[in-house]
Image (tube, rainbow, N blue to C red):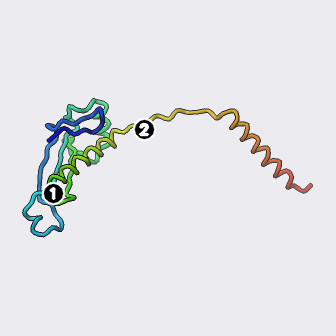
C-alpha cells in the first residue's frame, strides 16, 4: 500500500493506515457470502506523525463526531463487489474528509466604499426625496 497524499503539504504514511476486510451486506447473491469485499480503513489522528500540532488540534475539533474514543477515524466502503475498488474508494473518502476538515477560509479584508459610490448613494436619496416631495398636494 502506498502513502496517501491529502494535500501538497500533507501525506499520510502507509504505515499509519490499517486496512481490514469483511463481508459486505446487501444484495449480491452467493458472492456476498464468499467474498470479503467491504473495506474498513483506519487512521489515528492523535498519534499521526504526519500532522503538525495546529492541524491535529483542528482535525480533533472538526472531526470529533467521527472519531473513536482513541482518536481513530474509520472509513468504510462497500460500494462495489471488487475489493480493490472499495480500497481505492475508502482512500479517496479519507482524503476528502481530511482535506475538507483542514480547509481554512481566507480571512475577509474590510474595504471602504469609494467616493463615487458614496456620491451615487446620496444622489439617489436626493432623487427619491424629490419624487416624494413632488407627490405632495399643498
Up the image or down, 50 lies above or below 29; here it is above
The quarter holding residue 24 reads bottom left
Task: Tell me the residue at 24%/35% (across/down).
Answer: 11
Count of numbered marks: 2
Please indicate whether residue 56 sits to the left or right of residue 43 in the image. right
Please indicate whether residue 77 sits to the left or right of residue 101 in the image. left
Up the image or down, 132 lies above or below 44; here it is below
The quarter holding residue 49 reads top left
Please indicate whether residue 84 sits to the left or right of residue 10 in the image. left
- Camera-near label (2 vs 1) is 1
Image location of residue 96, percent across then percent down: 30, 45
On-image quarter of the N terminus: top left
Query: What residue is pinned by disc 1?
Result: 82
Image location of residue 8, percent across then percent down: 30, 34
- Mark 2 or 1 closer to N-term? 1
Task: Tell me the residue at 20%/48% (across/down).
Answer: 74
Question: In the image, which disc is placed on residue 40?
Answer: none
Task: Tell me the residue at 22%/40% (across/down).
Answer: 4
Task: Tell me the residue at 20%/34% (across/down).
Answer: 48
Q: Secondary structure at mark 1?
A: loop
Labelled pair 2, 1 in contact (Cβ < 8 Å): no
Q: Secondary structure at mark 2?
A: loop
Check disc 1: other Cα within 10 Å, few if <14, some if 14-19, many if 20+: few
Q: CA distance from mark 2 to mark 1?
A: 37 Å
Up the image or down, 80 lies above or below 72; here it is below
Image location of residue 15, percent across then percent down: 14, 37
Check disc 2: other Cα within 10 Å, few if <14, some if 14-19, many if 20+: few
The quarter holding residue 30 reads bottom left
On-image quarter of the C terminus: bottom right
Residue at the limit of the structure toward the right, as seen here: 138
Question: In the image, which disc is placed on residue 105?
Answer: 2
Image location of residue 38, percent across then percent down: 15, 56
Amino acid at each position: 500500500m502506498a502513502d496517501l497524499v491529502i494535500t501538497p503539504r500533507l501525506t499520510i504514511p502507509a504505515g499509519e493506515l490499517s486496512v481490514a476486510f469483511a463481508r459486505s451486506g446487501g444484495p449480491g447473491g452467493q458472492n456476498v457470502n464468499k467474498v470479503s469485499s467491504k473495506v474498513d480503513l483506519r487512521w489515528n489522528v492523535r498519534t499521526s506523525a504526519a500532522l503538525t500540532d495546529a492541524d491535529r488540534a483542528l482535525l480533533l475539533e472538526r472531526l470529533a463526531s467521527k472519531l473513536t474514543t482513541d482518536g481513530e477515524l474509520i472509513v468504510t466502503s462497500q460500494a462495489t463487489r471488487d475489493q480493490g475498488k472499495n480500497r481505492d474508494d475508502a482512500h479517496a473518502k479519507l482524503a476528502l474528509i481530511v482535506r475538507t476538515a483542514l480547509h481554512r477560509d481566507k480571512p475577509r479584508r474590510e474595504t471602504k466604499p469609494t467616493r463615487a459610490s458614496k456620491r451615487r448613494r446620496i444622489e439617489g436619496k436626493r432623487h427619491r426625496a424629490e419624487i416624494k416631495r413632488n407627490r405632495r398636494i399643498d
